[in-house]
Image: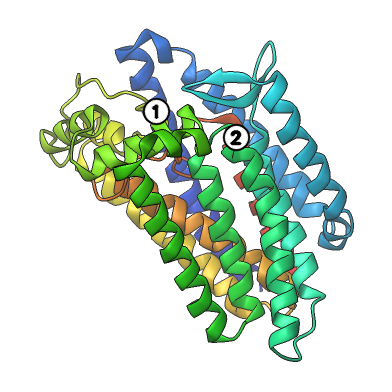
Amino acid sequence: MKKKVFIDKLFLFGPLFILLSISLINMYYAGINNSVYQDYLFKQALWFGLGFFVIFVFSIIKPKILFKYCKYLYFINVILLILVLFFGKTINGSRAWFDFKFFSFQPSELMKFSLALYLSEVLSREKKHGMKEEFKAIIKAVIITLIPSLLVFLEPDTGAIMIYLILMLGIILVYKINIKWYIISGIILLAFIGSFAYLYYFNQDLLIKLIGTSFFYRVDRIMTFVNNDSFQLNRALISIGTSLFFRGSGGVYIPEAPTDFIIALSISNLGIFSFILILICFYILDFYFLVQLTQTKNRKYKMFIAGFLMMFIFAQVQNIGMNLGLFPIIGLPLPFVSYGGTNIIVYFMFLGVLIHLKKN
């Protein structure tokens, strides 16, 4: 039994420690190459230390307590998202941070955890008797997800909105709705994308009035990707293309390297081998959580794990993809590797709950 527990912890914490180590090494090099990032190593190490304390706390809190009060946590988080629009600090065009003397706090990151808990709680109580009941469940899930999405849209933060939708999708997949709803949703989504594309290409003035200048700028960045004309991406690809297996290119300036372009930064510092190591670590972690998902019998807990896993995998794929020029740049950090306090702590909160669920 002890051997089984040891192996289980090894599969979780082994890859996690490697990812955290790679992150700290990259923060060290980022500080050497750019004075703007000179305190990132200390701050990142501080967040990791706090993160392990968070794991300990959430691994001993009974999940029943978290789900019992998740509604209040969700609504408090909604209030924080409203307040940040008025009192938040604007960084890179987004008013998304509460800026305190020693650290910044991003409510949209905490909403990932609140949303996963609340959606799992609400949908697990919804009984399935037919299309009507499924429709009611879908509407509830959409409304719960739409409220923070609209508030984050006003910041704006495209990456967070996509995470909320992906998280909701993971939970709905466990709820198991009729395939007709996926077809209907697909048709609505295609109609929305078509209308949006039409306004972007033929009536940008109206589109700017509808979504605002800041969000239009972010849409324009995505279209810049489509047209293959991005300074960030070009710098990232140069750093990757000029690196060797065990030795990076070094010295190539990449905007937002410690956050959005951490993969390009890692390759330019440590070589292509570091990227392969990151992929292996994420593969082990993804498989670990997938096994936990299949072994969990409690429907509510299963939804929570599915929402986390979908969000976790999407963040990996999107961040790595945009570093390699495969996906648009939407400002989504790589879990446990990119620099960022609130994002790191939230993932450690998820881990703490998952560890407790593993014991049950």
The quadrant of the picture occupied by the C terminus is bottom right
- In this rendering, the label closer to the viewer, 2 or 1: 2
The residue sitting at 19% across, 41% down in the picture is 227
x, y percent for residue 140: 74, 66
Amino acid carrying label 2: it is Leu
Q: Which residue is mark 2?
A: 154
Q: Is 323 positioned to the left or the right of 155 in the image?
A: left
Residue type, numbered disc 1: Pro
Give whichever of 135, 101 is nearer the camera.
135
Which residue lies under the disc numbered 1?
258
Quadrant location, the N terminus: bottom right
Q: Secondary structure at mark 1?
A: loop
Which of the labelled discs sits on residue 277, or is there none?
none
The quarter of the displayed image where residue 137 is located: bottom right
Which percent across, then down, holds residue 118?
Answer: 77, 58
Q: Nearer the viewer, residue 224 or 126?
A: 224
Residue shown at 20% from the left, 28% from the top: 235
Asked if the residue at tag 1 contacts the one at tag 2, i.e. Cβ–Cβ closer than 8 Å, the answer is no
- Left/right placement of residue 93 relative to residue 107 reads left
Q: If you read the primary sequence from the N terminus, does the residue marked by circle 2 or circle 1 appear first?
A: 2
345, above or below 161, in the image? above
Residue 223 vertical position relative to residue 283 in the rendered view, above or below: above
Spot the residue most to the bottom: 129
Q: Residue at x 76, y 33 (%)?
A: 80
Protein image colouring: rainbow
Residue 54 seen anywhere in this rendered image of the structure: yes
In percent of width and height, residue 121 lies at 79, 66
Q: What distance separates the C-alpha of mark 2 from that of mark 1?
A: 25 Å
- Figure quadrant of residue 272: top left
User: Callout 1: few (<14), some (14-19), or many (20+) C-alpha neighbours within 10 Å?
Assistant: many
* Kind of element beneath mark 2: loop
